[in-house]
Amino acid sequence: MLVELKLMLTDAIKASRQPPRNPACIALEILFHSSCCGAAASFVPTGGVMNPSRIALRLLLVLPMLFAARAATAQAPAPPKGFNTTTLGVIDLGPEIEGMQGRVLRMSTTTVAPGSVMPAHPHKDRPEIIYVREGTITEIRNGTAKEHGPGSVLIMTHDTVHGLENRSSAPVVYIAAPIARQP
């Protein structure tokens, strides 16, 4: 069992030097014997009898990876098509304000192509201010659509659920300043 654990850890160290991969894929490779663990770490030894201690060891290694993969995908939804964002600056708030460890203040500029839609999303634990520079963006909040033109400010707090749309034929440009968890 110790030899198997050493093989798994050695393979994990080698894998850490490779480009990042989906943690769920790595976990499944470990669980179902793939190339990352080598033949010595197989569930089913040469005799064809399943070894329960190997199954338990693999499950102990795999379950945290699967939970991490689920958490990562839950926190990082794909950006909507047509919303092109450029980060202008980031401040790590941990050293700046007591109790803000793991948080950043980020400023970015976003160009929204005509016809683009950002589906409704919550701002719980992620306040944000948007300043519209060019064009007209439509915000849908509580079932009501409101147009915001140049100079408008949108404020999203913990109880805000809203979506954004560019219903016009021209691009919209806005500056966003959210407080977010560090990536």
Image (cartoon, rainbow, N blue to C red):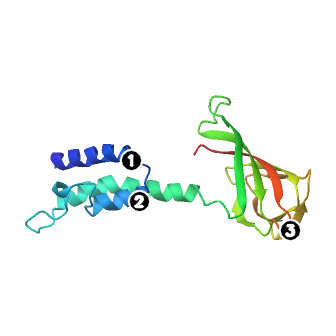
Task: Check the image and name the residue furthest to the front.
Answer: 170
Q: Residues within 10 Å of mark 2 (few under 14, many from 20)?
A: some
Residue 12: where, in percent of width, then height?
32, 47
Residue at the image position 69 percent from the left and 49 percent from the top: 126
Task: Check the image and name the residue furthest to the left.
Answer: 47
Q: Callout 2: helix, strand or loop?
A: helix
Q: Nearer the viewer, residue 55 or 11?
A: 11
Q: Which residue is mark 1?
A: 18
Amino acid of disc 3: Ser
Q: Nearer the viewer, residue 121 or 111?
A: 111
Badge 1 or badge 2: first in the primary sequence: 1
Residue 147: where, in percent of width, then height?
89, 63
Find the distance from the CA under tag 3 to the CA under tag 1. 44 Å
Amino acid of disc 2: Ala
Find the distance from the CA under tag 2 to the CA under tag 3. 41 Å
Q: Residues within 10 Å of mark 3 (few under 14, many from 20)?
A: few
